[in-house]
Image: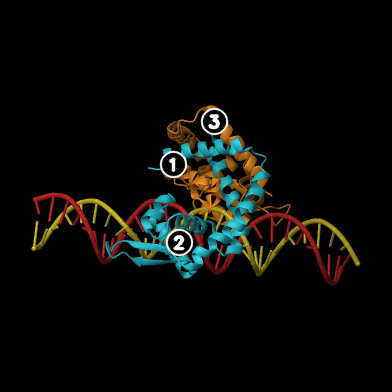
Chain colours: A cyan, B orange, C yellow, D red
DNA sequence: GTTATTTATATCGCGTGCGATATAATGTTA
DNA sequence: TAACATTATATCGCACGCGATATAAATAAC
């Protein structure tokens, strides 16, 4: 019985569980918008800067293109965005929001910050603790992303 | 442009990314053992206490049984565990480690703590910061698990 | 200028996660 | 005890993630 191999001592299991649970907390609100959490991430990237190549979106989300491509294809089918060949470099596909994709920003703004604020308030973490958490996660992320 | 909807302000995106990256950091070592990360979690649960019903394993991992059942089926096919009907309550399936499943504990002990220690050292977080991180994640997990 | 290499994206296969539903065994209740 | 509700597990469908590989376009090397 090695304490290093106990579930309760695993930072990774905590990250894995917390990520799933927080994503689940988003789900009811995202369902109202008709999207999933990874799709919401893509929208956030495009709300920040519209019309980006697949690769830039993937890098921003720290995902591989073989994850992002099918994600974008599903979102295109949902009418949230369009993908067009770039004239300058015909290898690139430029991804732009449709009117419907843009409109979701306001709906998300009405629903999500309030809804998630409530849930995270219930965690009884102070603002300072959330900032610390963010910093610690950033250390891990910046170290482990190649 | 709502700051609440920016990727860089999302604690959830940090959790999502950190969890994926840390899991990826485990992958080379787990590949040596011939298992995946969720399979490793199941093994840790059973190394701690062998022969548990499906439901107990699922609850320990905060997963639904419809995730755990196929996971256990794959692990049974790999020869890591066996599932037997409980005589007392024939609805329950008791999951026990095979010799092979038990042997993996020593191999994991040789490979994983050292390997992960190295990777997490590179994050330049102090022991105290890791403990704080664990506490903050526990607050979130305990609040959001129903 | 043709060949080789790199880059951008896509396709395939498989293992999760999870909502929805099904099935069988146990418990409860009228 | 027959009808109903609950519990334990399984099945199904779909959306990720990601390793491996394929394809086409651009770039570099010769």
Q: Residues at marks 3 and 1, common chain?
A: yes
Which residue bears the numbered disc 2?
A71
For mark 2, give the secondary structure: helix
Residue drawn at (73%, 52%) of the image: B88
Residue indicated by mark 3: B129
Instruction: Tell me where residue C6 appears, x and y as whole percent.
Output: 24, 51
- The answer for which chain carries disc 2 is A
Whether residues under marks 2 and 1 lie with C-beta atoms below 8 angstroms apart, the answer is no
Q: Decide which of B37, A121 is in the foreground and name it.
A: A121
Q: Distance between the residues labelled 2 and 1?
A: 24 Å
Task: Give the image location of residue A33, x and y in percent.
Answer: 58, 63
Q: Residues within 10 Å of mark 2 (few under 14, many from 20)?
A: some
Find residue A35 and report its horizontal and vertical position in percent.
55, 62
| Residue drawn 49% across the image and 50% down it | B7
Q: In front: mark 2 or mark 1?
A: 2
Q: For residue A1, say whether it is visible.
A: no
């Amino acid at each position: 019985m090695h304490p290093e191999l106990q579930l309760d001592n695993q930072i990774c299991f905590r990250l894995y569980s917390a990520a799933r649970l927080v994503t689940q907390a988003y789900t009811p609100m995202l369902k109202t918008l008709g999207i999933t959490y990874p799709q919401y991430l893509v929208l956030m990237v495009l709300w920040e800067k519209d019309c980006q190549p697949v690769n830039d979106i993937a890098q921003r989300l720290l995902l591989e293109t073989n994850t992002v491509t099918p994600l974008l294809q599903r979102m295109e089918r949902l009418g949230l965005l369009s993908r067009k060949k770039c004239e300058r470099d015909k290898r690139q596909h430029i991804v732009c929001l449709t009117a419907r994709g843009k409109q979701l920003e306001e709906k998300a703004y009405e629903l999500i910050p309030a809804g998630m604020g409530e849930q995270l308030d219930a965690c009884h973490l102070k603002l300072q603790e959330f900032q610390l958490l963010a910093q610690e996660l950033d250390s891990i992320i910046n170290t482990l992303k190649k």
